[in-house]
Amino acid sequence: MPEQCGLCTVLISRSNLGIQCQGRCKKQYHLKCVSLPPGLADLSADSGVLWLCKQCKQGTPNAGISSPLMTEMMDKINIVLADMTGIKCNQTEVMDSLKFYGDKIDDFTRQMKTVKVMMKDLNTAKQEILFLKNECSELRSEVQFLQQQSRAKNVEISGIPERKGEIISQVIKNVGVHLGINIVDSELDEVHRVMRHPSATNTNLPKNIVIKFSTITKRNQFIQAYRHQKKTGKMYTTDFGIEGPK
């Protein structure tokens, strides 16, 4: 018949094993009530191992569980408990390491996001620079074309003496008359003298005259007439209404 635990008075059962005191009281106690491991439930007086409850131990000098087997078991239990404590410490260290590296990964992830944003901005800036570079190249080509177009209307002549208060446009009109072509003001965009090249040895020579015609056609007509006149004979400044040699 099941007996009650001498401490908690709950019945001893297979699901709640107990041990019998081998002292005077002969009472049954739950293993957990007397803090014993489950392996001690089969102890009996025949096994040569005596277990005494707290009250019986107090009345029996040097009483308690005693045997080489029990000593070995308790040593092994202590070793297991020590190992479990070590495992718990190692587990704590592992968790700390995992947290440390987890924080590192989070920080690395944030840095990667920042780098991605910077790369995106860099690519955008690169595209803008490429666009501006192409646009600048197009503008440069357009300027060169316009300069060529502008120069295509220009003619530079030399050897015409300078006179104080001269009206250069009238001089050019006189040249046109001598060449056999009519030049009007609307056909002259610009007429002015320019400095001679610094390497010129004769510094007393007059400045050249640059004529910018309003059309390329008029400029070509002027050059053609000049070349024809040059083939037929010499030209003198007096032909243009200016005194002095060419």
Image: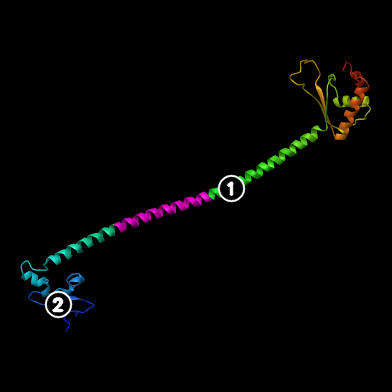
Picture quarter with the C terminus = top right
Q: Nearer the viewer, mark 2 or mark 1?
A: 2
Where is residue 182 shown, x and y percent of the image? 93, 30
Q: Main SS of the magenta segment?
A: helix
Whichever of labels 2 and 1 marks the residue nearer the N terminus, that label is: 2
Q: How packed is label 1: few (under 14 Cα within 10 Å), some, or many (20 or more)? A: few
184 w.r.t. 13: above or below: above
Q: Amino acid at mark 1?
A: Asn
- Left or right: 179 as drawn, with respect to 91: right
Where is residue 106 shown, x and y percent of the image? 44, 54
80 w.r.t. 215: above or below: below
Which stretch is magenta? 90-116
Q: What residue is shown with label 1?
A: 123
Between 99 and 183, the residue placed more toward the observer is 99
135 w.r.t. 177: above or below: below
Residue positioned 88% across, 24% down in the render: 171
Q: Amino acid at mark 2?
A: Gln
Where is residue 210 shown, x and y percent of the image? 82, 27
- Left or right: 44 as drawn, with respect to 124: left
Where is residue 52 shown, x and y percent of the image? 11, 72
Q: Count the numbered circles shown.
A: 2
Residue positioned 59% across, 47% down in the render: 123
Q: In whole angstroms, how far apart are the C-alphas of marks 2 and 1? A: 83 Å
Residue 2 image-quadrant placement: bottom left
Q: Residue furthest bottom?
A: 1
Between 105 and 149, the residue placed more toward the observer is 105
- Left or right: 200 as drawn, with respect to 237: left
- The reply to whether the magenta stretch includes residue 72 is no
Residue 135 image-quadrant placement: top right
Q: Which mark is residue 28?
A: 2
